[in-house]
Every structure is written in structure tokens, then in C-alpha cells.
Image: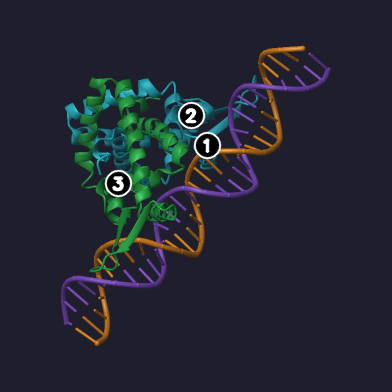
Chain colours: A cyan, B green, C purple, D orange
Amino acid sequence: MTDCLLLEEFLPYRLVRASELVSRRFAARYREAYGISRPEWRTFAILGQLGRTTATEIGRQSTMHKTKVSRAVASLEERGWLSRRVDEADRRIEWLTLTATGSKVYAELAELARSFQQQLADDLGAEAAAALERGLAAVEARFSVTSG
Amino acid sequence: MTDCLLLEEFLPYRLVRASELVSRRFAARYREAYGISRPEWRTFAILGQLGRTTATEIGRQSTMHKTKVSRAVASLEERGWLSRRVDEADRRIEWLTLTATGSKVYAELAELARSFQQQLADDLGAEAAAALERGLAAVEARFSVTSG
DNA sequence: ACTAAACAGTTACACATGCAACTATCAACT
DNA sequence: AGTTGATAGTTGCATGTGTAACTGTTTAGT
């Protein structure tokens, strides 16, 4: 046990565990309310924010594999929340937009997210929340660009 | 777009993404070096630290589903890195320990983890790393006990 | 014009995962 | 002793996921 690694001091492990604890709780909420999966929520959230984008861009921003995105898009389309349109100039590209219904659902999901965020911030306290954000910003700055 | 949620300000999302960026890099290392999966690494790490424990306890500490733990334990046993022994007093319980070979591999994995941690700390900078740890500690404190 | 490489996106297949149901064991209560 | 409920752990099955291979399209080089 001389070379024992203390997991409670191992940053990647703590990061994963914290992320699982938080995101599982949030996932439970939108799953119960709208029956959407995690990849679907992520796709929805990015599309709602960007307004009009492509599957590739969603993959880039969310760090999701392109097959995951592809399936999430197909599923959201089936529910009538999203529509595709092939780009005229470059017909490989599909532009994705929310439908009217999709926008309505998105607005509700956004509200759900905001209230969850508020609750989380209250639970953590202002100082700890700020510290967490600073730390995450540093990780994003170091890893986002270089990593694939 | 009036009710748009800004993902770059949404904490659960940032937490998940940061955790994925970091843990994917680390996972690539031990996968390439030893061919072990994520559940296996986690099981290994907890067992190495605790010295002697049960599958249930591993699940509790790692937030992994018990079937995941069960399969990881079976796989590590097949490789001869771990051995089980049924508790005499309560024969439902299986005590898990690392074998001699397992301990050797564990020591190498621990070293790999430490060097990764060092690299990460350098990348983030002392101040940002400390902030991240404070934030994670707050999440752990709030969610670990209550959540399932 | 033609070929090769690059890119957006989908699908087949093998593998990983979670839920529910299962075995086996123990503890508590009657 | 017998029944009920809880616990540790495993397994069947349906679903989720990544790799690699695929289609269709564009770009670059010859």
C-alpha cells in the first residue's frame, strides 16, 4: 500500500463523480417531464441556442460522437420538434432548426434548466459556485481546442 | 430566442463536458497501456486503495451500477489481478483483494495517475486547480450523501 | 475531364449498459 | 420452525453506444 493512489485527491476522478451526481439529477427531471434522453437533451439545447446549425457542429460543441448526434437528431425529428433542410450550395450539409412545437418545448426545458441551476447555486453557495466556474473555465481553456 | 439558455453558463453542462474532456484523455492512457476499461479502472483504483472490500462498497464509492461493478470484478478476476473470498460469517458477502500480480499492475497504474494529475495541475495552474477542487468539494458535500 | 482525398451524415455489427428478475443468504417477527 | 423482508451478487433481455464501413457530395491535383 506504499504506492497507493488516494482517489479523493485525484482530480479526474472527482470531476467525473461530481459531474455524474449533478447531471443524473438533472437528467431525471427532463426525462420524467418529456421522455427525452441525454443525447437528445444536449442536441436540443445546442440547437435551441444556436437557432440553426448542423449535426457536425452539435457534435463539436457537445463532445458527442457523430453517430450519437445522428440518432438524437433523427429521434427529435420523428417527434416533430426539429426539421432538416439540405444546403443548396453544399448538399452534404443539413441545416437543422426547431419547429414551432420544438421551440415551445425548448422554452420549457430552458426554464427547467434555469431553475435547476438556481437551485444548484443556492446549494453550493455563491463562493463555491464561483470557484467551480473558475476551475471549469481553466479546464475548458486548456482542453477544448486541443482535444478531439 | 427570448428564452434561450446559454449553455456556456449552464453549470451541469460545463461540468459534464469538462469531466469528459479530462477523463477521456486519462482513459486513453490506461486503455492503451493495459487494455482495461473505465469500470475496470475504477474498480481497480478503489480496491487498490481500500486493500480489501466488497463489490457493493465499490459501487457506493464510485457511483457505478452494481451490474457494472459485478462485470468489472469478473473481468479483473479472469486476468488474475483480483481474487474473491466468501465471508465466513455472512456468506452473501464476497471480500475482494488484489493478487500479487494485481498489486504490481495497480502500482504502475497509480504512478500513471499521479503523473497525469501532475500534468493536469501544471496545465491548469495552481490557482485554477485549487478553485476547481474547492468547487468539487462543495458538490461532493451537497450531493454525495443524499443522492442515490 | 479524371482521379484521389476530404467531408457530412447514416448504418451494420459487435460490445457495453441498465432494468428487472433471479439465486442465495441472512435477519426479524410470529 | 416458518414466513416475510432485506441484502449481496449475478444474469437475461432490451436498449444504447462506438468502430468501421458505407453513400453521397465537394474540393484539389493532375
| Residue closer to the observer: B17 or B116 | B116
Q: Which mark is residue A24?
A: none
* Side (left or right) of B117 relative to C22: left
Q: Is residue A49 visible?
A: yes
Q: Earlier along the polypeptide chain: callout 2 or callout 1?
A: 2
Q: Position of residue A44 (x, y in %)?
A: 44, 34
Residue sitting at x 40%, y 25%: B1
Q: Position of residue A54 (x, y in %)?
A: 53, 27
- Which residue is drawn at the image coordinates 31% and 56% (left, top)? B96
Residue beneath the point at 27% across and 47% down: B61
Q: Which residue is mark 2?
A: A58
Q: Nearer the viewer, mark 2 or mark 1?
A: 2
Looking at the picture, does residue A29 appear above or below residue D4? above
- Circles 2 and 1: CB atoms closer than 8 Å: yes
| Quadrant of residue A88 within the rendered picture | top right
Q: Amino acid at mark 3?
A: Gly
Residue kind at label 2, given as amino acid type: Ile
Mark 3 = which residue?
B48
Question: Could one spot residue B4 in this view of the protein?
Answer: no
Q: Quadrant of residue B45?
A: top left
Residue position for label 1 = A73
Tell me the mark number nearer the camera, choosing from 3 and 2. Answer: 3
B111 or A103: which is nearer to us?
B111
User: Disc 1: which chain?
Assistant: A
**Disc 3, SS:** helix
What secondary structure is marked by label 2? helix
Residue nearest the observer in this picture, A40 or B31:
B31
Q: Position of residue D5 (x, y in %)?
A: 25, 70
Report the Cα–Cα distance between label 1 and label 3. 42 Å
